[in-house]
Amino acid sequence: MTVDMTPFISDGKYFALVVRLFLGVSLVMHGYPKMKGGWRQAGQWMKSLGIPAGAAILATIVELVGGVFLVIGLIVPVVAVIVAIQFASVVGMKTSKMGARFISMEQGKPSYEIDAFYLVLALALVILGAGVLSVDSALF
């Protein structure tokens, strides 16, 4: 028994939908706890690394609002660029300030594989756009 995946793979609209929903929901799940006060702790952590604490508020907004925009499919390429910039910054910060490796085999040592994964997903959405079942596809 074979499954024909050609419509899913050859037409990026459905792939974009899956990527958009996965990334959007993941961002909301990261941003929501920060919105409820976790941004203070994140701000203190960033300040300890020499990064302005206000960056935590910006990250919270990008994750929460950007995640919602991705889920509904609103201005997806713009949001995806902003998310890509955020996660490129996180990868840079983790490697330069924390000495993180892509994958850490030592417990408690920082890694950046999930941040790089989100970065790649955001870049895919910059290229693919919103896909089907999105506000963008209804408007444009």
Image: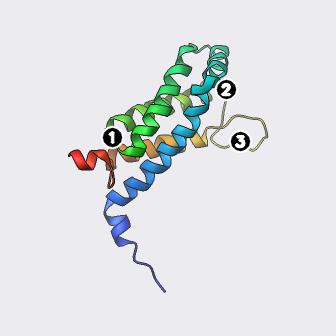
Say which element carries label 3: loop
Camera-nearest label, 2 or 1: 1
Occupied quadrant, residue 139: top left
Give the residue displayed 44% in from the left and 30% down from the top: 85
Q: Are there few (<14), some (14-19), or many (20+) residues within 10 Å of tag 2?
A: few
Occupied quadrant, residue 30: top right
Q: Label for residue 104?
A: 3
User: Farthest residue in the left direction?
Assistant: 140
What amino acid does circle 1 point to? Leu
* Residue 114 locus on image (x, y percent): 59, 42
* 20 relative to 27, above or below: below
* 65 or 50, nearer to the observer: 65
Say which element carries label 2: helix
What amino acid does circle 2 point to? Met
* 121 or 140, nearer to the observer: 140
User: Farthest residue in the right direction?
Assistant: 107
Residue that mark 1 sits on: 74
**Sequence-earlier tag: 2 or 1:** 1
* 106 or 81, nearer to the observer: 81
Residue that mark 2 sits on: 98
* 34 relative to 104, above or below: above
**Sequence-earlier tag: 3 or 2:** 2
What amino acid does circle 3 point to? Ser
Camera-nearest label, 3 or 1: 1
